Image: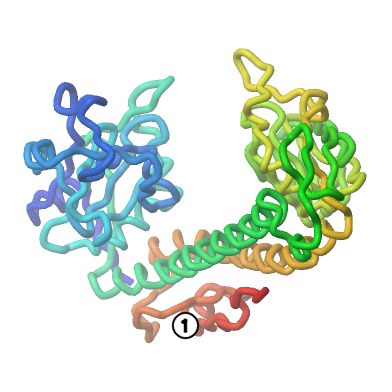
Amino acid sequence: MKLISRTLGDICDEVRGTIRTGPFGSQLHESDYLEQGTPVIMPKNIVDGKISVEDIARIGDDDTRRLSQHKLHVGDIIYGRRGDIGRRGLITKKEEGWICGTGCLRISLGHRVLDPTFLYYYLGDPKVVAWVANQAIGATLPNLNTSIIRSIQVKYPHLSAQRKIASILSAYDDLLENNTRRIAILEELAQSLYSEWFVHFRYPGHKKHRMVESEMGMIPEDWNVVKLDSALTLQRGFDLPTAQREKGNIPVYASTGRAGTHNQAKVKGPGVLTGRSGSLGTVTYVKEDFWPLNTTLWVKHFHSVTPIYAFYLLRSLDLAGLNSGAAVPTLDRNNVHRLLIILPPYEIIKQFDSYVSAIFELKIKLSKKNESLRGTRNMLLPKLISGKIDVETLDITVPDIIEPEEQQDSAIIANPEPINATQLALPLF
């Protein structure tokens, strides 16, 4: 497959595309932001290649008209310019007309020599990412500018091949996004069930029980107010420097979640852990054996609760509010143990467990599918971009879904196997 090599700046100049930064200086102040209005995309809003509307800034009509030159269009690529310079996102119809904010760069391709989705993936090639990082200015806070982006060398085939490559990689990301949405729905379903039963006390048979006064308000008569250590015991995690980790399939967890693998486990699964140092209040359920790092607290003993119930119980507590650190947020397990909780009878906990365990199994299955999808996509991306896999000979259109199994490069592309929709059906209660 023949590749043409040119700088991104030369390509944009030829087709009247643009590479420019978002508004600077006095053009936007924090006081200009509103609760409603046109969204302004900052680097923090670029999450996993998508634009997140969580905590997104918005501006009014007057500012939108004033900053019209910074409006985004379908196919534009937005780049984080400061700090985490690897962040990039492809603008879709959903974000059309939004504003490229301070701290971002915008690439507009104009009349097409490059397919925007192809370029989006090309910029994610590890070699390109490393080159851009090496060009960044500043030691403490790396910065990009338009000159650096214009200097990126792009090697590309003709448009039809670009679109084949883009459709292959997009199919993986579409399925990843679909699975992620389903996981979110399952999490919401399980959390709603917990709230109904254990916060609002609308559990099976609740009408048969009268409510009584307690130090935590009105509770069902056969429930008790106890300290958390009556339900479970937390233990600090274990030291394991990165340099001492051996290759293996045992997950290692830090305060923010999964942080690699090792060849040994410290805790038998299923287990529950939360952040102890740094990120507080991040609670994780782990089905398999695992290694909790010293930045975590893990549940050593489940006295009168199950692991699944303990997961939701700890999530319901204001653990971040127990911060006892100054420079680094820290959670003292003794303070957590002293928290008062409302403890239901064990048979109700077990009944809740029987419902939610089905949801957990499906979440775990979807998460493992996503791990496989990411691994296969990441393996294919540099091979497709570099032309090592010649897509010109492959008879492909835009596939609905690609389901990666333990197949190899071209076989994965040419013979996608769609996922069975019944595998993703939500359990009915």
Q: Nearer the viewer, residue 175 or 66?
A: 66
Would residue 318 be visible to someone looking at this image?
yes
Describe residue 40's horizontal placement relative to residue 216 as left or right: left
Picture quarter with the C terminus: bottom right
Question: Is residue 37 shown left or right of residue 358?
Answer: left
Q: In which quadrant of the rendered view does residue 376 lie?
A: bottom right
**Can see residue 151?**
no
Indicate the quadrant where residue 168 lies: bottom left
Q: Give the side of residue 233 with respect to residue 325, left or right.
A: right
Asked if 255 appears above or below 287 in the picture, the reply is: above
Residue drawn at x 74%, y 67% is 355
Q: Residue under circle 1? A: 414
Q: What residue appears at the point 67 percent right and 68 percent down from the top-left corner?
A: 362
Query: Residue 213 appears at what percent x and percent y?
Result: 77, 39
User: Which of 202/130 is in front?
Assistant: 202
Residue 110 in the image: x percent, y percent?
Answer: 12, 57
* Residue ID at (47%, 77%): 401
Query: Tag 1: residue type?
Result: Ala
All told, the count of numbered labels is 1
Pick the quarter of the image with the N terminus. bottom left
Residue 224 in the image, given as x and y percentages of width and height: 85, 42
Question: How are the colours assigned in the image?
Answer: rainbow
Q: Residues within 10 Å of mark 1 (few under 14, many from 20)?
A: some
Which residue is at a point 75% across and 52% down the rendered structure image?
A: 286
Relative height, residue 410 to residue 318 (above, below): below
